[in-house]
Amino acid sequence: MNLKDFQKIYTPQIDKFLEDHLASEVDNPIFSKIMSYSVMAGGKRLRPLLFLATLETLNYKISESELRIACGIELIHTYSLIHDDLPAMDNDDYRRGKLTSHKKWGEAEAILAGDALLPLGIQWITEGSNSAALAIIISQAVGPNGMVGGQYLDIDSTNNDLVKENVKVIDQMEWLKTGCLIEASVKMAAVYAGASTDQVDRLDNFSKQFGRSYQIYDDLVDVVETEQEAGKATHKDADEGKNNTLTLLGIEASRKQLLKMIKTGKEAVKIFKQPLLGDFFNLYQKVL
Amino acid sequence: MNLKDFQKIYTPQIDKFLEDHLASEVDNPIFSKIMSYSVMAGGKRLRPLLFLATLETLNYKISESELRIACGIELIHTYSLIHDDLPAMDNDDYRRGKLTSHKKWGEAEAILAGDALLPLGIQWITEGSNSAALAIIISQAVGPNGMVGGQYLDIDSTNNDLVKENVKVIDQMEWLKTGCLIEASVKMAAVYAGASTDQVDRLDNFSKQFGRSYQIYDDLVDVVETEQEAGKATHKDADEGKNNTLTLLGIEASRKQLLKMIKTGKEAVKIFKQPLLGDFFNLYQKVL
């Protein structure tokens, strides 16, 4: 199967699972609504799709339990967006064309919605898999040596001239901030489906290339797209003294790096019969 | 063993584990320092002690893995304190006589320190136990139907006259906010040690009484102690329109309710040879 067909089947299932289970599993109806507002704000479901596509690539049957794990990843991704948008962090008013959580519901509510989505996400992943190994993979991926560590480096490096020229720090920051959760989405599927050592290595290489390049893509969107297309404020990074691969290398060199990663990533998964995982790089088309 | 002797042995071990492992397991040294600042701010280690005391009560040997689980609980408790103190929440400048995280390091740093301590805590609990069941218990206890749900009700009920007279809402809010994590600390030990059904029931009853009464105790401290003794701003709740059992029932009726819970809680665990768990209620002596 290719990614377009796969998305047609599973994106609606992911959306429905998220909407239904946030409504039925969160006791307080108003708090449930606040959490659901950000989760149902029209994300691409990239990480749950990656998890499910890796299962499909390994010929592992997808049903309710696997959807629960996939949606758990999306809850965690949504938590990270809510907290990133907070006034003390990126201070964004809009996300995906809608008011951000703190603008819509208040700052305390947004902090708590994020604080609730994170453990609920880990809970769904662990319930769906009944696996301590998956609970550990996801906790590590979003902890101080993963996603949150990347956010800390981001805060620490903003308007920091010492960092501006430091390729290594920026590379690590972008890897942690974005790459770790993407890598974990693929790794959890490989462990869950009982992939062979060779398969695990190839999937790992793929997810590292895709995870690292995704932030470069996202930063390119920031300069290439207009605000209306991106659904959020663009051209903000340079204005706000943000340091990233793009501000360091410029547009053309960033594109070149992206192309190199696409090649290596596609190479890693070409032994699998289905083109599904390699197709994820097609997402980058609009900035190439 | 009684609680005093138990604390003499294990409080220093908990403190040392926390300090050593936050330093060695968090890659970024400055972020590690920010996280450690709040974790090492002189807490009583009540929840890890409860976990370990329940193991001791069930004659389960305590070593490195069990300390890792216990300390994971303390990381999660610390995260909740850091986020509660934020300007958008309780807006507290001091905690345990020291500047709160956001006052010391900045608001973004405090949000991220909390965001890092939560998954690291779940990771330690799951690594120490290698148990999906424990990962699920802790995630539920701190999620939207647990601790964070209680925080949401607290925010929602502050300065809310409809809630002021609503015993049921206040009871639920205090249970979720404080009781759930205490209950989970005991329940994780019971599941981990393979307690019998009768033992689980008794421990559950004990932890429900202790968990519920702890918030009443904490609110009483707020009016009974001076600021210097409590290490934080006291007498704040009434000033800020906070609704709790105390503002609803008054000091004397709250004390009576506390005494009743102590009696029921002690009764539940008196079949165990050691007085260890019942001793936890002695903590309340100073407000009785």
Image (cartoon, coloured by chain):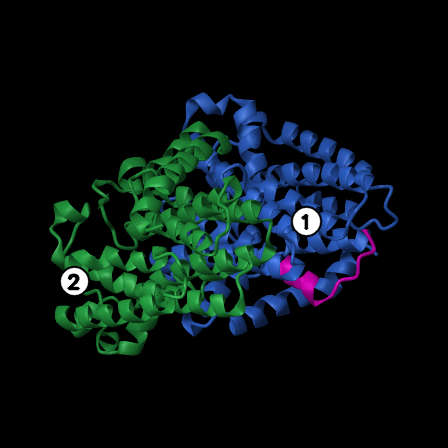
Chain colours: A green, B blue
Q: Residue furthest front?
A: A273
Q: Point out which mark residue B188 bears.
A: 1
Between A193 and B217, the residue placed more toward the observer is A193
**Can the viewer see residue B158?**
no
Q: Position of residue B88 (x, y in %)?
A: 36, 45
Looking at the picture, which amino acid does disc 1 mark? Answer: Met
* Residue range of the region highlighted in magenta in the rendering: B58-71
| Left-right relation of A288 to B98 | left
Residue B14: give x, y in percent of width and height: 65, 64
Count of labels shown? 2
Tag 2: Cα neighbours inside 10 Å, few (<14), some, or many (≥20)? some
Label 1 CA crowd tier, 10 Å (few <14, some 14–19, many 20+): many
Q: Which residue is mark 2?
A: A288
- In depth, the one of B91 and A48 nearer the eye is A48
**Spatial CA span between label 1 and label 2:** 51 Å
Disc 2 marks a residue whose amino acid type is Leu
Name the quadrant containing residue A5: top left
| Residue at x 51% of width, y 39% of height | A64
* Location of residue A115 in the rendering, given as x and y in whole percent from the top left corner: 44, 46
Residue ID at (23%, 61%): A217
Instruction: Please determine whether, in this image, residue B235 is positioned above or below residue A87.
Output: above
Q: Is residue B65 magenta?
A: yes
Query: Is B117 situated above or below B20?
Result: above
Instruction: Tell me what residue is drawn at x 56 percent, y 42 percent.
Output: B140
Q: Quadrant of the C terminus of chain B?
A: top right
Quick one: SS at disc 2? loop
